[in-house]
Image (cartoon, rainbow, N blue to C red):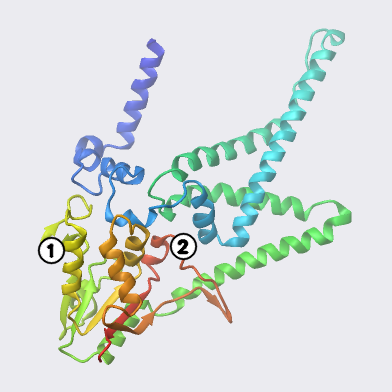
Amino acid sequence: MMYMMLCGLVVVVLWLALNPYALLDPAAYFDLDRNDSVRTQSLVVAGSLRVLYTAQFEGTTPYLYAVTNWLRYGLGLPLTGLSLAGVGYSFWRLWQARREIFSAGAASESAAPSSGGSQVPPDPQVWGNWFADAFLLAWLLAYFVVAGGAYAKFIRYALPLIPPLCILAGRLLADLWDGPRRWRLGLRLVVLLIVAAGLLHTLAFVQIYRQPDVRLQAADWIRKQIPAGASILVEKDEGLLLHRAAAEYGLEGYEWRIWNPYEVAGVSSVRYQAPEVSAEQTETYLQNLLTTDYVIVGSSWAERFTAAAAQFPAQADFYRRLSAGQAGYRVLKTFEVTPRLGPFAWDDRGAELTFRLFDHPAITIFVTAAD
């Protein structure tokens, strides 16, 4: 009992030493009314606190999402397939090493009486291989169980998985390269194809940074094509910042109107949750917003409310009707950057929202249908 208490005390002391702000600024850790506190974010990730900026995860499948979205778009299909194959190969090597260790142990015990009681230790290299695979697989499994089952599945949560996956994928490639002599040529061709496919995917994604940011493209187009004095409805979106168009992009001389999903009909959100307003009130409020000459929206709020249409029917219907041309507006211009290499494009519109939101969001400009 004393040792358990001592161990607990050491853990607490180390935690406080590495996280001094838990004492210096406890609100940063425990204040529920701070969105950046550890307590608040823990509830958000678990789904116990349903905030608007995680609505896109409604209906997503735990664990499967980590493979079909995190790895698919974060690593690309070639490296995803190779990484998963590397995990399977690591399990196979782990099983083989275990068999060798147990076989060596059994042989050592049977030989002990005839050798005067001394036992031959297992091969250190076998032990080393077993430990290396067990260590990496244990980390992957533990983190996957914790992060993959969360309600909020931001793609950045996959980052701790990437180094061990790449190590296992690289080891598999190295072993394929030095495979059996009679199959070596074919295996090396497979390795080269996989490496080339991964490299092409990376080069294609890098191309989005070789073009002007879509927000700057949109701002320049607005400045040149939309006449001064026009009224424009935009979302309050921290990914686009068009609700601060005059300050951020120098778009002065327009009549800006803001649609803030955190404030509906004068009712403000509490802790980034949906304002407590009925669907009928929300629908009327949104309809009254559609009186401007132009409407500019990104993909973030549309995707969130569409994914959680059961919880937000009025907001989901607002974006659906707008995009379908049923709200009195038609599409005038769309700004979108897609990872591309020559004639080949990689469609990443299905990637987790924050994968696109900050560096290559989609922006659509609508104009009144009568114009």
| Relative image position of residue 361 (x, y in whole percent) | 38, 71
Instruction: Answer left or right for 133 relative to 59.
Output: right
Where, by quadrant of the figure, is residue 3 drawn? top left
What amino acid type should be assigned to the residue bearing mark 2?
Answer: Ala
Q: Is residue 328 above or below residue 12?
A: below
- Residue assigned mark 2: 351
- Residue farthest front in this picture: 280
Compared with 105, 81 (above or below) is below
Disc 1 or 2, which lies upstream in sequence? 1
* Secondary structure found at label 1: loop
Q: Quadrant of residue 237?
A: bottom left
Residue 102: image x %, image y %?
A: 75, 24
Mark 1 or 2: the one toward you:
1
Residue 350 percent across, percent down from the top left: 47, 64
Horizontal side of 24 relative to 109 (left or right) equals left
Please give the residue where the numbered disc 1 appears in the rendered image.
265
What's the CA distance linking mark 1 and mark 2? Answer: 32 Å
- Image x and y of residue 251, in percent: 21, 82
Q: Amino acid at mark 1?
A: Ala
Q: Is residue 90 visible?
A: yes
Residue at the outermost left position: 266
Seen at 19% across and 72% down, the residue is 287
